Amino acid sequence: MAGWQEDWDQPIPGNGRAEEGQPVIIKLVRHGQSQSNIGEVDATWHGDHLVALTPKGETQALMAGMSIGHDFVSRAMAYRSPYLRTRQTMNHLLAGAACPSH
């Protein structure tokens, strides 16, 4: 297959952009466990955008950052929604990957 790279799971050297013919790696992370996931709050009453992570969700996000790793995260373009739990997930993921959160 043209453009296939045997070391596809390794970071792309340079500026983090794929060179022509090289694969672009996309890693998706869902938010960690939230208070509404375990029935602690009702998102319809509380406001879905205000639902926070549980301590377990914070740990899950931290572990995701450690698993994905600094090399990948430090060069990645990251997107998240403005919801509280996704902002918290991003911050913990960055901490787990040893990357600054600002």
Image: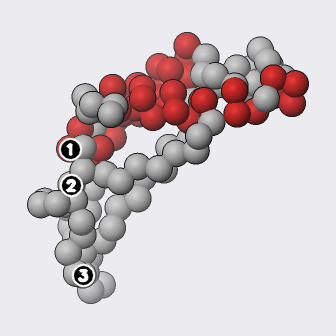
Q: Position of residue 24 (x, y in %)?
A: 33, 67
Q: Mark 1 points at which residue?
A: 71
Q: Position of residue 85 (x, y in %)?
A: 60, 30
Mark 1 or mark 2, earlier in chain: 2
**Label 2: few (<14), some or many (≥20) within 10 Å?**
some
Q: Which numbered circle lies on residue 11?
A: 2
Q: Is mark 2 on a helix, strand or loop?
A: loop
Amino acid residing under circle 1: Asp
In this picture, residue 79 sits left or right of residue 22: right
Q: Position of residue 44 (x, y in %)?
A: 86, 30
Q: Quadrant of residue 17?
A: bottom left
Q: Can residue 31 be seen in this view?
A: no
Amino acid residing under circle 3: Gly
**Label 1: few (<14), some or many (≥20) within 10 Å?**
some
Q: Is residue 19 visible?
A: yes
**Label 3: few (<14), some or many (≥20) within 10 Å?**
few
On the rendered image, what quadrant is the C terminus found in? Answer: top left
On the rendered image, what quadrant is the N terminus found in? Answer: bottom left
Image vertical order of residue 78 relative to residue 1, above or below: above
Amino acid residing under circle 2: Pro
Mark 1 vs 3: CB contact within 8 A = no
Closer to the camera in the image, 43 or 33:
43
Q: Is mark 1 on a helix, strand or loop?
A: helix
What residue appears at the point 56 percent right and 22 percent down from the top-left corner?
A: 57
**Measured Cα–Cα span from mark 1 to mark 2:** 6 Å
Q: Mark 3 points at which residue?
A: 21
In this picture, residue 100 sits left or right of residue 46: left
Mark 2 or mark 3, earlier in chain: 2
Mark 2 vs 3: CB contact within 8 A = no
What residue appears at the point 70 percent right and 20 percent down from the top-left corner?
A: 35
Closer to the camera in the image, 73 or 67:
73
**Measured Cα–Cα span from mark 2 to mark 3:** 15 Å
